[in-house]
Amino acid sequence: MITVVKPGTFTTVQDLGRKGFQRLGVPESGAMDKFSFKVGNLLSGNDENTPALEMTIFGPELYFEESAVIAVTGADLLPKVNGKKIKNWSTIKINAKSTLTFDGPVGNGGRGYIAINGGFTSPSVKKILGSFSTYLPANFGGYLGRALSEGDHFTNHSDKKIQNSQQLKSPPVFHDKEILRIVFGPQEDRFFENSLRELLDSEYQITPDSDRIGCRLAGSKMIHKDGPDVISDGNTFGAIQIPGNGEPIILLADRGTTGGYTKIASVISADWSKLAQLIPGCTVKFQQVTLEEAYLYKKQEEELINSLRETYRNLPNFYLQGKKIDILTSTGESLKLQEQKNTKYTFDVEVNKNNHEVEIEMRT
């Protein structure tokens, strides 16, 4: 049993988001800083999408009835176990009858994550539309559709022992003043040229009315050529929307699925982690990059966590009529399975337009 002694300022259950329902008007939600979220799960021995806790500015106080393995990532909120400081971005073993606390931010981001080996369950935490993520505006997902409260509790389901502690090499450092790289579009043609230059030359401050829906900026105002409205189109994480007042809003995890305001640019996905860590009072400048550079920066980000994926391995080699074949995911990547003793996997595969069922048993 894990009990919430103090909830912190805003602590919610999140995973990587509610995929596939934006066409029905349901936002993705999910962890704001997906990089930190994934790393936390890998460090604690979990699949990358295992539900974890997202903290904002001040973390909770949790009492662990039984021993557990955890990882704390993201902003440095000064985590401690029984009063002794522990390391961020590392595998941490907690003894039974221990208390995890946080002393607050030290200027290195505003959102942290607690991943627990094996994940956790509670009668109050239900999977809604394929995700455990909390969507507070509609009060569903997560823990009863709300932030954690005093007295809430979880059952830990650690299903394996972590033999070796890991830590992320060269973890990110978040700053109160950030530079976010952007790609212009899709509606930059709706702005005067001097507004595009102004966006790159100006410094903006994060306002107090920012939240998980959008990061609102105060600073130079963008001037539309012919009004702020466009035919509503899809909203993505990191899109920079310019409403009628000319002040930019960067759309975040709980954004609406569509919007009718012009979008002047988008923050590249490699900088979403830095974007998610911005809190009111922080300042930001924008730097233009090409689409090709954006892909390269994303590849570099992925390389930072590849070493943590060593607990995964490719399927054994398969041969069809003496020729080696690969089993790929729907995105074209080689399928990887987590190494778990005596685990069976069943796949439907197509060979020469004939469907076959293949069963694979992992023995480790």
Image (cartoon, helix red, strand yellow):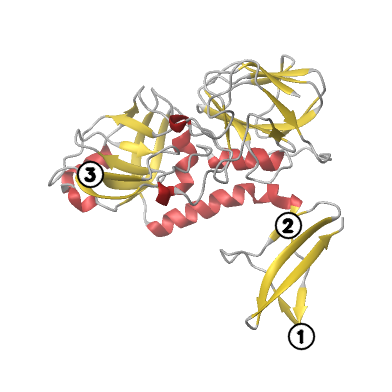
Q: Residue at x 37, y 27 (%)?
A: 210
Identified by mark 1, the residue type is Gln
Q: Residue at x 75, y 70 (%)?
A: 358
- Crowding around mark 3 (Cα neighbors within 10 Å: few <14, some 14 to 19, many 20+) is few
Residue, far left: 226
Residue identified by numbered label 3: 197
Q: Secondary structure at mark 2?
A: strand
Q: Name the disc covering residue 321, or none.
A: 1
Identified by mark 3, the residue type is Arg
Nearer the camera: disc 2 or disc 3: 2
Residue 350, located in which quarter of the rendered image? bottom right
Nearer the camera: disc 1 or disc 3: 1
Residue 157, located in which quarter of the rendered image? top right
Question: Residue 168: in sight, yes or no?
Answer: no
Residue identified by numbered label 2: 337
First along the sequence among labels 1 and 2: 1
Label 1 to label 3: alpha-carbon separation: 61 Å
- State which quarter of the image contains the N terminus: top right
